[in-house]
Amino acid sequence: MTTVTHEHVLAAARRIAGHVLRTPVIQISPGLWLKLELLQHAGSFKVRGAFNRILSAGELPDSGVIAASGGNHGLAVAFAARALGVRAEIYVPEVTSPVKVDGLRALGAHIVQTGAIYSEAADAAAKRAAETGALSVHAYDQAEVVAGQGTTGLELVEQVGAAPDGAPDPAQGAALDTAQGAALDTVLVAVGGGGFAAGITLGTAGSTPGSGPKIVAVEPERIPTLNAALQAGEPVQVEVGGVGADALGASKIGGLAFEVLSGPRVESVLVTDEAIVSARRTLWERHRLAAEHAGAAAYAALLSGAYQPEPGERVAVVVCGSNTDPATLTTS
């Protein structure tokens, strides 16, 4: 298995610079920030990994790229492919929201909707890739994808960590000094297949092994891929259901992600569907942020008390996706 490191994240930042947005961070109360990755191209962080994977591949076959997705990854791959002039074929499960399917269609992707859950769509996509030779862009378990997602962490540390004047931009490849990130104690991030949380863990790492902010990996109780793996000591299959199933619907944590997220900086937290729904509504009503359920999962851990910061703890929450039907923001 390929090991992904902080240096891979720095290389990804150089590679995708100019293709992705540097998303804003807002402070909503003393010691609490939101990283607004829901404002990223295609509505989520996923474009970071998609661009890094495609740009790392060199010359592509005429069949282009292929991906399986709960929706957001497919949108990201379709966006990156269109930007780079590449054909995209996207497999999505039947539970994928109509908003995401419409978005894929608008981006010019060839869409195949098959399987009850993500893993079934992924199996179909893998079979198709073997037939056509298209470049497979995995939703979470590829080194280039994990490294690309980790660039979110690089940005977050720089934005919240009170970097000194003239500090280098991580997009230019310079490592962040540990002292620059000392202001940030904890990052809350949602987990599906784990690529995003693993990337952020690597992207926020300090200059010495094991250093950097604590990572609180938040999952719906009904899809505990990381939590179950940590208890078992290895990735295991879990049932998939609930409000986060379309975007956090992996039935097994990725191997690369498990390698990173089983480290000492990571704490696993579970939240109920009710907490996710409430957090999503709060993001809209208080901050006018139109997050999807998966995008609100990390914030749900704070609001519900599933994660309780210590007094004075400086916390950042990543709001990671906005591909949702706005009509449901106050109702479900």
Image (cartoon, rainbow, N blue to C red):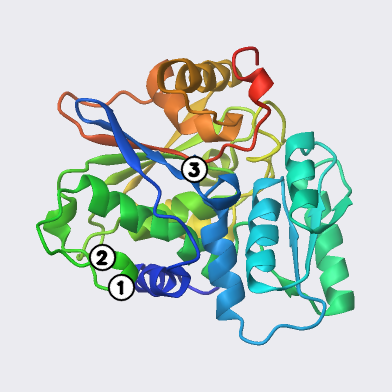
Quarter containing the C terminus: top right
Q: Point out residue 150 in the picture as x, y percentages from the top left corner.
A: 42, 59
Circles 1, 3 touching at the beta carbon (< 8 Å): no
* Residue at disc 3, secondary structure: helix
Amino acid marked by disc 1: Gln
Q: Point out residue 260 in the picture as x, y percentages from the top left corner.
A: 43, 58
Circles 1, 2 touching at the beta carbon (< 8 Å): yes
| Along the viewing direction, whichever of 62 and 146 lies nearer the viewer | 62
| Figure check: 203 above or below 38 | below
Amino acid marked by disc 2: Asp
Give the labeled residue for mark 1: 172
| Figure check: 175 above or below 116 | below
Tag count:
3
Q: CA distance from mark 1 to mark 2?
A: 6 Å
Q: Point out residue 202 in the picture as x, y percentages from the top left corner.
A: 37, 60
The mark nearer the N terminus, 1 or 3, is 3
Q: Point out residue 107 in the picture as x, y percentages from the top left corner.
A: 74, 55
Residue that protrudes farthest toward the top in the picture:
331
Q: How dense is the environment of label 1, judged by Cα within 10 Å: few (below 14), some, or many (20 and up)?
A: few
Q: Which mark is residue 39?
A: 3
Which image quadrant for residue 98? Answer: top right
Q: Which mark is residue 169?
A: 2
